[in-house]
Amino acid sequence: MEELVIPVRKISPVKRIIRYSMAAAAGVALLIAGIMLYNYSALTPEKVFAANYQSYELSTTRGENAQEVSPLEKAYREKKYAEVVTIVFGRPYSIHENFLKAMAWMELGNTAKAIEQYKLVIKTAGPANMLNEEAEYYLALAYVRGKQYPIAIRQLESIQKRPGHLYYKKVTPEL
């Protein structure tokens, strides 16, 4: 009977510590991989958009010399976005009014119309106009929301290449 008993080898304490450490490290690595996989699979264009989108607020002017406010701007200020996109003038829209229409389309969830308006603002505003930089950033977010990722990435990289851009600091690797 003694011949049939398999001898048990004792593991030295150093090897035991190494073995348990490796098992713990593998467990932590699996946990981190699982969390990263969940975050990646739960990531949606709408979540990326919502995390980076901030509704555009109009500034207010006070005093006797305040400029006349257009009906489009008044409707936007009152958050009547459906009214903003339906207002028609007998004159061409200003750059500011086109930008407000683009923002209203975004608020209404019509990304395709918003993209059209942002492109129009960028085309007519020129690089010196501050609304140009606003429109560039929001256009990139519209592309993300519309699942047009290659165009969105190009737009965001264009912003990231210009340190003086209004939204330079918002375009992070995470975005």
Image (cartoon, helix red, strand yellow):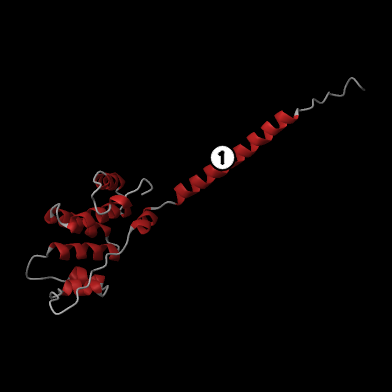
Left or right? Give the position of 160 relative to 121.
Answer: right
- In the displayed orientation, state which residue is furthest to the top: 3
Crowding at mark 1 (Cα within 10 Å: few <14, some 14-19, many 20+): few
Extreme residue toward the bottom, this view: 64
| Disc 1 residue type (three-letter) | Ala
Instruction: Residue 101: give x, y in percent of width and height.
Output: 20, 65
Q: Quadrant of the N terminus?
A: top right
Q: Tell me the element at label 1.
A: helix
Residue 127 picture location, percent across and down: 15, 52
| Left-right relation of 46 to 108 | right
| Residue 64, quarter of the rendered image | bottom left
Of 162 and 125, nearer the camera is: 162
Q: Quadrant of residue 154?
A: top left
Q: Which residue is the extreme one toward the front? A: 63
Q: Which residue is mark 1?
A: 29
Q: Residue at x 67, y 31 (%)?
A: 18
Looking at the image, the residue that sits furthest to the right is 1
Rendered position, 175 above or below 81: above
Residue 8, compared with residue 87, is above or below; it is above
Q: Nearer the viewer, residue 168 or 125?
A: 168
Residue positioned 26% across, 67% down in the render: 57
Q: Quadrant of residue 30?
A: top right
Residue 26 placed where, x, y %? 60, 37
Left or right of residue 32, residue 69 in this image: left
At 32% from the left and 62% from the top, the residue drawn is 54
Residue 8 versus residue 164 in the image, above or below:
above
